[in-house]
Image: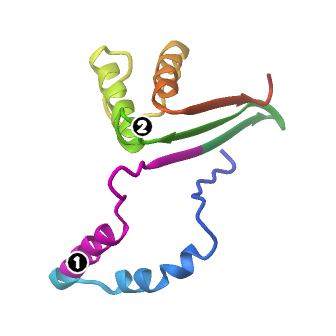
Amino acid sequence: MREFVRGTLRLNGWKDAWADVFTEIETLKGAAGNARLQDMSDQFWADNAYDEGEPDRVVMCVALTAEKDGIATYDKTYVMDAWGDARGTAMARLVSVPVSLAVESVLKRQIKPGVSAAPSDAKLVAEWMGEIDRLAQHLQVVDHLG
């Protein structure tokens, strides 16, 4: 692998708006630091919690290109958009259910237990992606080579 980039899109000015918080966190030490961190966490939850009935939202875009001898052999982009609805929060659906799929796959001996690369079995991947498609309001896979 020559290059891997993982990023999070944030609104302009996000880093500056939180600069004082980051600076304070870097100085926290010991029990007093842990207590202050807990106080900060409690305050953030109080100030930034979703309103009653307000849905959460998960938006992801993942692009992966693999090359051999300078020629793309794999080039796909996955785009997903999901929000909380009657089925529950988007975060719960799109974190908990995929974890349960992995656990079930280990129990069925479809994948090995422990930390490993994503499954490469096409049938299993299609099964999991089908479930993600049902969980999200929008899922699109763009095959740039197809």
Task: Quadrant for the C terminus, please.
Answer: top right
> Which residue occupies 67% across, 41% down?
63
Q: Position of residue 32 (x, y in %)?
A: 17, 85
Q: Secondary structure at mark 1?
A: helix
Q: Is residue 19 above or below residue 80?
A: below
Q: Residue furthest right?
A: 70
Residue 49 as seen in the image, left or right of residue 137: left
Q: Which residue is mark 2?
A: 94
Q: Position of residue 134 (x, y in %)?
A: 48, 24
Q: Which of the colour schemes (rainbow, by chain, secondary structure, one colour) is used?
A: rainbow
Q: Earlier in the sequence, mark 2 or mark 1?
A: 1
Q: Residues within 10 Å of mark 2 (few under 14, many from 20)?
A: some
Q: Position of residue 66 (x, y in %)?
A: 71, 36
Q: Amino acid at mark 2?
A: Leu
Residue 26 as seen in the image, left or right of residue 80: left
Q: Amino acid at mark 1?
A: Asp
> Which residue occupies 45% across, 29% down?
135
> Which residue occupies 35% across, 31% down?
97
Q: Is residue 61 magenta?
A: no
Q: Residues within 10 Å of mark 1 (few under 14, many from 20)?
A: few
Q: Is residue 111 above or below residue 48?
A: above
| The residue stretch that appears in magenta | 35-60
Residue 137 as seen in the image, left or right of residue 74: left
Q: Which residue is mark 1?
A: 39
Q: Nearer the viewer, residue 102 or 117?
A: 102
Q: Is residue 49 magenta?
A: yes
Distance in Å between CA atoms under marks 2 and 1: 29 Å
